[in-house]
Image (cartoon, rainbow, N blue to C red):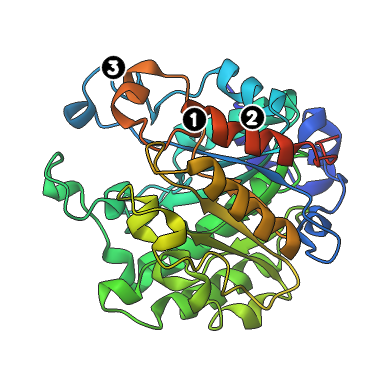
Amino acid sequence: MITRRALLAGLPAPLLAGFAPEGLRLGAPDRRALWDTATGPHLRGAVFSQRRVYEDVDGPTFLGPGPVGAPISRGALDSLAEAGANLAVWSGPGPLGEGGGHAPDAAIEDHIADWLDRCRAAGLYTVLAFRSGPGRSDFAFHPDGDWYPRALYDVSVWEDADKQAAWAEMTARALRLYGSHRACAGVLSMVEPNGADMGRPGVWATMARAITEACAGVTSDAPLILSPDRWARASHSAEIEPLSDRAVIAVHDYEPWAYTHEGGPDFRDAGRTFLERRPEAERWGVLEFGAGVDAPDLAAYYADCVERLEAAGANWSCWRWTSGWEVYEAREGGMNITRHDGAMAVLRRAWRGNTARPA
């Protein structure tokens, strides 16, 4: 059987334009304009997070049947659109294998293609944001975890030139496959790069240049998106901002950490620094911010964040929206924003400003 992924990978652009499904045809509007802070924000929404399923770790139900979980229900996507959002950031595995060989993973590529179709059907743009890929497993985000075999912890990308090159190839391949889909608002090459924290300062800046060069020859209506080192901190944007004429800069902001992740004190008393440092680029956004649903005065925190983002003209998405998979949400719902009525009221008011939708 010829899959849609195989069709996209195998056809030259002129044939692709004629035979691909309507939502995948070339010629969709240039989506780089959606990131212009002088006229924005244009995209406002929330993040969905998924990773590869490991049955030995996850069992048969926690993340669903795989290959990627937890499953995101149709109701979860529809509820985001119905609340007024127009952006669903997908934070998930990249389309190349994490182990040896770096071959394309057909199951992941088909999953991404399906996600794009689902977002367009719901009236949502999406950013494809790659948490894992060659030499980096999703467990890189859980370095101290004792709930998975240590053999699954992989951060070798920071020391392996072949894996760094494969990451650039993966990003270019994703832009080539998915960048002309009308729901694709961009491809974020790596979620929260952290080479400096792994004792490899400067590696990400070199990788970012290689990624930009690899993508330069790809015809895509959607932009390449790059985040700075140190887990996408805006304070480390300077080393990749020279690339911003060809890429959107995306940062994450979880300051003050004592409030967003430890539940207190009140954000106004914990050294508020949200968005005090920001990229100098013309096209940038904040693709993750948020706090635990038990944090004090959460609605006021979100109102303050949104006010600052709107004033900056920056696209934004908060962490995170429900997957709709109850087994997962029962254990991992501490930052599921749909569980807090006051914060949701703030978001709904802000999302009323959205007018851009996939054609």
Of the 4 image quadrants, the one containing the N terminus is top right
Q: Residue 332: x percent and y percent?
A: 32, 31
Q: Which residue is mark 1?
A: 340
Q: Earlier in the sequence, mark 2 or mark 3?
A: 2
Query: Would residue 19 appear left or right of 338 to someone viewing this image?
Result: right
Q: Residue at 65% x, 45% y: name it.
A: 177
Marks 2/3: CA distance? Answer: 28 Å
Q: Residue at 51% x, 64% y: name it.
A: 168
Q: Earlier in the sequence, mark 3 or mark 1?
A: 3
Q: Which residue is mark 3?
A: 61
Q: Are marks 2 and 3 in contact (CB under 8 Å)?
A: no
Q: Residue at 36% x, 74% y: name it.
A: 161
Which corner quadrant of the image does residue 84 belong to? top right
Q: Are marks 1 and 2 in contact (CB under 8 Å)?
A: no
Residue type highlighted by circle 3: Thr
Q: Residue 241: x percent and y percent?
A: 62, 79
Q: Are marks 3 and 1 in contact (CB under 8 Å)?
A: no
Near-viewer residue (90 or 95): 90
Q: Nearer the viewer, mark 1 or mark 2?
A: 1
Of the 4 image quadrants, the one containing the C terminus is top right
Secondary-structure class at tag 1:
loop
Q: Residue at 49% x, 38% y: name it.
A: 320
Q: Earlier in the sequence, mark 1 or mark 2?
A: 2
Residue neighbourhood size for the residue with mark 2, other residues' Cα within 10 Å, grouped as few (<14), some (14–19), many (≥20): some
Q: Which mark is residue 4?
A: 2
Residue type highlighted by circle 1: His
Q: Residue 120: x percent and y percent?
A: 73, 30
Q: Residue 295: x percent and y percent?
A: 39, 43
Query: Would residue 293 appear left or right of 347 to someone viewing this image?
Result: left
Q: Nearer the viewer, mark 2 or mark 3?
A: 3
Marks 3/1: CA distance? Answer: 26 Å
Marks 1/2: CA distance? Answer: 39 Å
